[in-house]
Amino acid sequence: MSTQHNDAIPPHRYTAALAGQIEQRWQDRWEEEGTFEVPNPAGPWGEPGVAERPKRMVQDMFSYPSGAGLHVGHPLPYIATDTYARYLRTTGANVLFTQGFDAFGLPAEQFAVKTGQHPRKTTEENIAVFKRQLRRLGLSYDQRRRISTIDPSYYRWTQWIFTKIFDAWYDERTGRARHIDDLVAAYASGELPTPDGRPWAELSRVEQADAVDQRRLAYKREVPVNWAPGLGTVVANEEVTNEGLTERGDMPVFRRNLAQWMMRITAYADRLADDLDRVEWPESIKTMQRNWIGRSHGAAIRFPLGDNEIEVFTTRPDTIFGATFMVVAPEHPLLDQVVPQEWPEGTKDAWTGGAASPKEAVSAYRLQASRKSDLERQTDDKAKTGVFTGVFATNPVSGAQVPVFVADYVLMGYGTGAIMAVPAEDPRDWDFAKAYDLPYLRTVQPAEGHDEDRAYTGPGVMINSDNERISLNGKEIDQAKADVIALLEREGTGRGTITYKLRDWLFSRQRYWGEPFPIVYDEDGVAHAVPASMLPVELPEVADYSPKTYDPRDAASTPQAPLSRAEDWVEVELDLGDGPKKYRRETDTMPNWAGSCWYEIRYTDAGNHEVFVDPEVERYWMGPGRGEGEGRANDTGGVDLYIGGAEHAVLHLLYARFWHKVLFDLGYVSSEEPFRRLFIHGYVQAYAFRDDRGQPVPAAEVQEHEEAGRTAYTWQGQPVTREYGKMGKSLKNVVTPDEMCEEYGADTFRVYEMSMGPLDQSRPWETRAVVGSQRFLQRLWRNVIDEETGALRVSDAAPDEATLRLLHKTIDGVRRDFESLGFNTAVAKLIELNNALTRSEAPPRAVVEPLVQMVSPLAPHLAEELWERLGHNGSIAYEPFPEADPALLADDTVTCVIQIKGKVRDRLEVAADISAADLETQALATEKIKAAVGDQVIRKVIVRAPKLVNIVV
RNA sequence: GCCCUCGUAGCCCAAUUGGCAGAGGCAGGCGACUUAAAAUCGCCGCAGUGCGGGUUCGAACCCCGUCGAGGGCACCA
């Protein structure tokens, strides 16, 4: 047996194996000692004096414990928040940092349907795998605060919040939510009219309940959904293919109206839009939310049509003189009343769809449109279809008679389901006008060079827009809008309006693996909230997790949720205050979003089983004016730093904001927003390689060659092509953190992830480059520890001037980088300082110790180990971050560049505090400059002392 | 189609935010150590910032146009 290989490696080298031992040891110790458990000002984890301590709350978005485990992309944000949290602890802050699991959801349920395995079992197994993988990375979570949405002790409070939303209504007069009792009182006193205007006392019990339900923030309503009888479930729009089949199983989908729980998020549209101005989020995400809310100011305008009228919504009332026709949605109710028997005079052939009469044409078109799913109507290519309805309406401003069409590019669900079509200024109307031989009239002067064969949507002045009642010509668009609205309101033909794209949130799911609703129905079908004392309503065991399925083509069938099979659970006798009575439980469950709508609040007080959060605890961690919010005007409060991916830019972040605002209105939290500062991270992506048949080949086995000056790739000798994108099993390019920890150690992996590039940018993974981070940590180790003997190498001698200056510059720079999440540049500065020390025989302790401290947020295990070997007893985690000495930051002399017309011509060593006049004199006097200027006339000299002089000749 | 990011050396990325294009890492080359190799250490950078214009004394950075990559939304009147 040969031991040559082992002999070659010094016994105390920082290898992956040694790193592994060190990492394991410190992870155990942190856990035993509860190093990262953080106290609260009150409640179960309350400690005296905490309320006065500065705090920070740092959080990643929930992770979903999928069965596939983690790849190297997943931990990127976790390592970043951990590094940041660790840095914050060294600045004296009380840091709340933990992580939990968003563990309800479809994948576990589908697995359960397939295998009969209880979703709780598979989910908990997945969570265990995740926890093991994450533990190995040394993330400094407060383990006590880790929560999982599937725990009854958590979803008890999710249900409780639901009952609070159910028991609330939005009072438009005050612009906030109030308890439902206030609504009953307002109805009873006549302060608010009942829905049909009759006095409250005259309504029956069921009618009263109905009147209240109509204004609840959580309410039940018949809404159109995608019903797939073959699957027995309702599917989301994105799960329906272009062919109108389900993505999973290719089952037919039918549009059906079903009673579903809804959340009245539209009541908060204005506040959700306006408060974006008060949070520190990336502009791109704010824009996406604003677009999603889609608040648009426009006008509702009534176009007379015989004895009837069509009300349209438009954002461009200024263009009303250019409205040459109108379009209504196929579902528009007016079509049932106004379509005549015969084509009127002036009907063009193209308008009729080949039908003998308008009635036939319209009903044929409506039938055709009804067969399309929403998605089909939207993706059906750009071709516009429609038919003439046989009627003309009157433009209330210009007086023109305009033909009315029905077309499915107008949606019943938005605005009024009818538009005035202005082809000259709207591309969709333009397309329709071209297809159906309709005229256009420009009312905004197009910019120079505009293609005459296209609609013009840009700015300009109004043209062709005047008559005896109004003149818009020559005015800007905004002014023209205001003028038209004023005229409409004066003449009673329209009004200025605000509409939103945002719709109420469909909150029901016909699934098993979700939170049960805390709702029961009495014998009249009236819904009652389950009182707090009876929560949680636990998920019952069922024999079969799948919903009842039907013949795939049986459109008339009705969904039966999996919970409805648990009959013993559904039928229940409760005493809700008026004696024991029989009730039926709601059998829908909540959507995946519910658990992630408030988890940040629960993190702050996860051990409290009396309330969902102690108000004092919430105020401390999330209240306005604290942490990052200190000194901020009009601060909203909320988590100090929330990091996540852009895929949650709209839905999760909007829903969580909505719940938070309701809780704020009802007085349960002091913060107005859940996340004061948001940071969106980039993705770790990867190259994938395909052979000539387009099949992915294992990326790790692909070889790189130089071929005719270009890089070529081969796998097992055959050429393959490279593409860039996500990491995934099917692309055979997955690299896992486990492999990296095995091969290099967790600290190396952490440093590499942080040094790859800026956190907000995506970048490709390159295993080959990880060794650079390992070498850095090895050099650091070697600067402290002798590889042969294991002895300390540091000296107590004072560092030289240059090293000392470098140290203080590094401290200053690294601190700034940590503050701004610039971990890649922080690592570069630390490598530079470390490299400066490798030249030294015995590196000075006065430099080594601060270096180890600065490395500790990035490579915490190694830093703890070195800190201990340097003779310190406690953990390095709370050692105060080194302070930079300002006197050592400023150099005595600097290199000044001298430019002529912006081109560098000479350099000058000058004192850092040189005056502008002296510098100019010196610069003009150097030989090179004198030669370069020659006899040219100096027109101007720009001096930026002490670094730059620019001479303009 | 619309919106948001990003294009700097063979590759990943810096550049005190309008002032010397190069901090750090990978790969590569040369040298030292070694019988040799690995490891380690030292040294080595003419890419002018995707492309075309503009503003400026001065542009990687600001503006306009254009091409490419990634992400998001989608007939929202």
Image: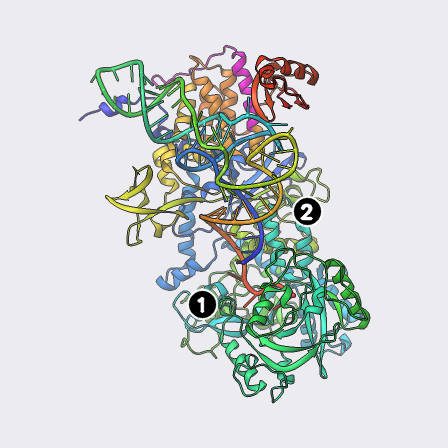
Residue positioned 40% across, 62% down in the render: A110
Q: Residues within 10 Å of mark 2 (few under 14, many from 20)?
A: some
From the viewer's perspective, is A375 left or right of A423?
A: left
Tell me which segment is drawn in magenta. A786-814
Q: Quadrant of residue A650?
A: bottom right
Judge whether A418 appears above or below A133 on screen. below
User: Which of A508 and A774 lies nearest the eye of the viewer?
Assistant: A774
| Residue A35 visible to an observer of this rendering | no
Q: Quarter of the image containing the C terminus of chain A?
A: top right
Decide if residue A558 is on the left or right side of residue A657: left
- Quadrant containing the N terminus of chain A is top left
The dot on residue A196 is none
Residue A689 % position (x, y): 33, 47
The amino acid at mark 1 is Asn
> Circle 2 — which element?
helix
Q: Residue at 68%, 47% (x, y): give it.
A: A278
Parent chain of label 1:
A
Q: Position of residue A654 (x, y in %)?
A: 60, 55
Which residue was labeled with disc 1?
Answer: A242
Residue placed at 35% from the left, 23% from the top?
A: A13
